[in-house]
Every structure is written in structure tokens, then in C-alpha cells.
Image (cartoon, rainbow, N blue to C red):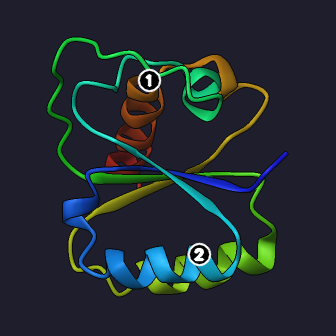
């Protein structure tokens, strides 16, 4: 499988252009989501079977890694650390592969708030 990043709310990632260039160099595909795509399952997003759903404004930016090598992930995470606004991060697993993007988002937000 190809390495992919699912990115929600790219406008809130200050160095998005640098992230885009880094992914291009590392041959990592970026899939951009907006607030009308959050009800789609991760597996459908990765397979580009994205349907528009009801509009859901989720607040922080989210980056979901799929099949990204650890060295590449480290480079991307280093770049994302420069972000001054909250950017939640996750890795696609066998468990969350069938979740909707919104479910991953809510789970990440809950974990973030517990660990603040």
C-alpha cells in the first residue's frame, strides 16, 4: 500500500506548504478533507470513495498517517511541532480503519483533553 496522509483543516497548519513539499519528496500522497467529508470511513477515504455528508465543523487540524515509514513520520512530526495551533495526530490501525473520520477526531480530542 502507498503511504498517505489524511489532512483535515489544512488552513490551521501554518507550514502546510512545507509539509506538502516534504510529502512530495517522500512520495506520500495527501488526501485533504473538509467539513463535509467527516462522516466518511477511513477505509473509504483511503480508497478515494469520499461522499459529501452533512457539514460538521471540527475545530483543530487533524493529520492521520497511513502506511508512512517511521523515519518519514518523524520528519513530518518534527515539521508539525512548529505549528502554534492544536493539530491532532493519529495512525491508521486495524481497529480504526472502519471508523468514521469524525470518530477518530472525537477519540483524539478526548485523549488530548485527558492529557492536557
Compared with 19, 5 (above or below) is above
Compared with 19, 113 (above or below) is above
The residue at 26%/38% (across/down) is 34
Residue topped by disc 1: 103
Q: Is residue 65 left or right of residue 68?
A: left
Q: Is residue 3 left or right of residue 1?
A: left
The residue at 22%/32% (across/down) is 35
User: Residue 21: in sight, yes or no?
Assistant: yes
Circle on res. 29: none
Q: Residue 70 occupies which quadrant of the picture?
A: bottom right
Could you tell me residue 32's position as x and y percent?
39, 47
Q: Secondary structure at mark 2?
A: helix
User: Residue 116: in sight, yes or no?
Assistant: no
Could you tell me residue 84's position as x and y percent?
22, 80
Other-residue count near label 1 (Cα within 10 Å), few / some / many at <14 / 14–19 / ≥20: some
Compared with 115, 23 (above or below) is below
Q: Nearer the viewer, residue 31 or 88?
A: 31
The residue at 59%/75% (across/down) is 24
**On-image quarter of the C terminus:** bottom left
Q: Is residue 17 left or right of residue 78?
A: left
Q: Nearer the viewer, residue 83 or 47?
A: 47
Q: Secondary structure at mark 1?
A: helix
Residue topped by disc 2: 24
Q: Nearer the viewer, residue 1 or 80?
A: 1
Other-residue count near label 2 (Cα within 10 Å), few / some / many at <14 / 14–19 / ≥20: few
**On-image quarter of the N terminus:** top right
Q: Sequence order check: which comes first, mark 2 or mark 1?
A: 2
Amino acid at each position: 500500500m502507498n503511504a498517505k496522509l489524511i489532512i483535515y483543516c489544512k488552513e490551521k497548519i501554518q507550514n502546510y506548504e512545507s509539509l506538502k513539499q516534504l510529502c512530495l519528496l517522500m512520495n506520500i500522497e495527501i488526501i485533504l478533507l473538509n467539513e463535509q467529508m467527516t462522516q466518511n470511513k477511513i477505509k473509504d477515504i483511503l480508497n478515494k470513495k469520499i461522499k459529501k455528508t452533512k457539514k460538521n465543523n471540527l475545530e483543530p487540524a487533524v493529520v492521520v498517517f497511513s502506511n508512512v515509514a517511521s523515519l518519514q513520520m518523524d520528519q513530518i512530526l518534527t515539521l508539525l511541532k512548529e505549528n502554534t495551533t492544536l493539530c491532532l495526530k493519529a495512525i491508521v490501525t486495524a481497529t480504526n480503519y472502519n471508523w468514521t473520520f469524525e470518530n477518530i477526531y472525537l477519540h483524539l480530542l478526548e485523549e488530548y483533553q485527558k492529557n492536557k
